[in-house]
Amino acid sequence: MADSFIGKDFLLHNDPGRELYQHYASSCAIIDYHNHLSPKDIAENRKFENLTAIWLEGDHYKWRAMRINGIAEEYCTGKAEPQEKFRAWARTVPATLRNPLYHWTHLELKTYFGINSLLNEQTADAVYEQASAMLQHDDFRVQALLRKMNVQVVCTTDDPIDSLIHHEQVAEQENGINMFPTFRPDKVYNTIDPQAYATYISLLGNAAGISIQLYDDLIQALSNRIDYFDSFGCRASDHGLESIGYTLEDSKRAQEVFKKVSSGVFLTRAERFSFQNAVLYELGKLYHKKGWIQQFHLGAMRNNNTRLLHQLGPDTGFDSIGDYAQARGLSDFLNQLDQTNQLAKTILYNLNPADNEVFATMVGNFSDGSVPGKIQWGSAWWFLDQKDGMEKQLNTLSNMGLLSRFVGMVTDSRSFLSFPRHEYFRRILCNLIGEDVRRGVLPNDLSLAGQLVQDVCYNNVHHYFQFQV
């Protein structure tokens, strides 16, 4: 049985990098300000029945790799027995060499379970049985896993109509878990299906305590829900979009477009985009008033396989990078809010690596000296969330902005075993800076470099979000 290659110097290829990781990065607490974890699982301190449940349930990264490897859907999202699903994943792991899944898989096995063997078809049953047995202990329940990884803050992703009852339960438990909601209003401007939209708007009105008949009612309902989220310690919103833009005509047409879709009429693509931008502009002003951070994830082309979308639903592994124009519209949107000094702190994430330099330079346009790093270029996201993508993001940000003000890494994950991604990022960061020190590109002053490392890993995000913990 071959041992894992994940040693104490994993990804650290120079002495300064090793020292930076050991003395400055490794002990930093984690503020995970964007993920898709289940608030219910955290509140109820879920115990997972086996390794498949905690590792493959909802993980479209793994499902996608399994399908590419020729694994039938029965073993991804289907009704195969849990151990059979795990065996199918184990057969796939050797085929993921040079894919980040290979690193994440073995890093997670080592970090959580102390399993150092390589995962493959031969080791599958032993790994499954050992890890599944460990998961039955109370120190492998969800809350214990978070504490094990030194997670100080978890920000879930929540729809405006959510009751936030699970956040209330966690706040009352006083168990050291700090869980805050994030306001994700994508369905408010997803007008592609008028019937589904009408149903959602009715639910939003009920949650906000208002009858939504007009566009102004919609904005008032959103304001009410933002107040509600804020009462639970929410500090941020998040939006998943192809692209964004804004003109004054968008706001002028919004009332008419809302009336049209509310009457069951299908909107044109141009009308949908205009309505989205009008709503986001109003939301942006509300976020600024609350002192929230607004996050924009831009550039995903979602649900490409409509046959399997209808069979399995969204977020099941059929999304890709889109090639949408970003710069002009993004600038217009941020500029319109900035003109009246109503631009909230903002984090921008791009999915297309061709937009790296666009986003790295865009953030500098609207940083006004009022807050360090007011507008952020977010961490390498989704398909870019791997060693090469992280290095490119860090290098581009260093060249065109201030790495020292970066708010660092997020898991963006649905898995409670995903927190070693922070370690992964920190090792890459330390190695990158350490190599510059080794080559004499940066001063041989580890206290100076170490301060940058700690700021990126923890201090910056702590000061930026100002969570009450």
Image (cartoon, grey):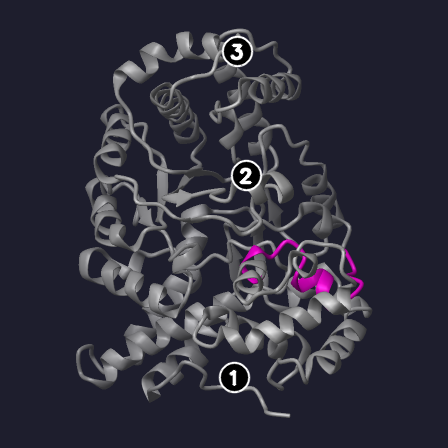
Q: Amino acid at mark 1?
A: Ile
Q: Amino acid at mark 3?
A: Ser
Residue occupying image coordinates x 57% and y 11%: 212
Residue occupying image coordinates x 37% and y 23%: 269
Where is mark 2, residue-wise?
234
Q: Residues within 10 Å of mark 2 (few under 14, many from 20)?
A: many
Image x and y of residue 81, in percent:
79, 63
In front of the other: label 3 or label 2? Answer: 3
Q: Amino acid at mark 2?
A: Cys
Give residue 408's mark.
Answer: none
Would residue 36 be found to the left or right of residue 454 on screen? right
Along the polypeptide, which appears first: circle 2 or circle 1? 1
Residues at marks 3 and 2, CA–CA distance in whole angstroms: 30 Å
Where is mark 3, residue-wise?
262
Residues at marks 2 and 1, CA–CA distance in whole angstroms: 37 Å
Where is mark 1, residue-wise?
6
